[in-house]
Image: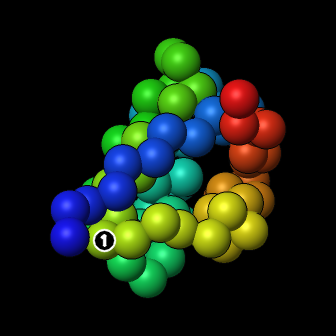
Amino acid sequence: MSNVITVYQVTGMSCGHCEGAVAEEISGIEGVLSVEAAADTGKVTVTSASPLDEGAVRAAVDEAGYELAARP
């Protein structure tokens, strides 16, 4: 089974510290293999072993102090 890549939109990130905080929280979700956050676009690309529960991702982003925007 191949990995799942999901792109989330996160509001409120403005610097490298923000990217690190969001990436660290999302990395704690079971099954997450890598997280790439880009403050300039607000996009967070998550590679995981299987599809993630959006509620878990929302809670992790919330914990980092940011907000998961609605996915298109």
- Lateral position of residue 28 relative to residue 63, left or right: left
- 35 or 49: nearer the viewer: 49
Identified at 67% across, 57% down, the residue is 61
The quarter of the displayed image where residue 45 is located? top left
Q: Amino acid at mark 1?
A: Ala
- 25 or 44: nearer the viewer: 44
Total labels drawn: 1
**3 in relation to 16, above or below:** below
Identified at 25% across, 61% down, the residue is 3
The quarter of the displayed image where residue 37 is located? top left
Q: Is residue 35 visible?
A: no
The residue singled out by tag 1 in the image is: 49
Q: Is residue 67 visible?
A: yes
Element assignment for label 1: loop
The quarter of the displayed image where residue 11 is located? top right
**48 in relation to 42, above or below:** below
- 59 or 54: nearer the viewer: 54
- Lateral position of residue 31 relative to residue 69, left or right: left
Quadrant for the C terminus in the image: top right
Q: Residue furthest front?
A: 1
Identified at 62% across, 70% down, the residue is 53
Identified at 53% across, 18% down, the residue is 41
Q: Residue furthest bottom?
A: 30
- Lateral position of residue 53 relative to residue 21, left or right: right
Quadrant for the N terminus in the image: bottom left
Q: Position of residue 2 (x, y in %)?
A: 20, 62
Q: Residue furthest left?
A: 1
How many residues crowd mark 1 within 10 Å: few (<14), some (14–19), many (20+)?
some
Q: Position of residue 24 (x, y in %)?
A: 45, 63
Q: Position of residue 54 (x, y in %)?
A: 67, 62
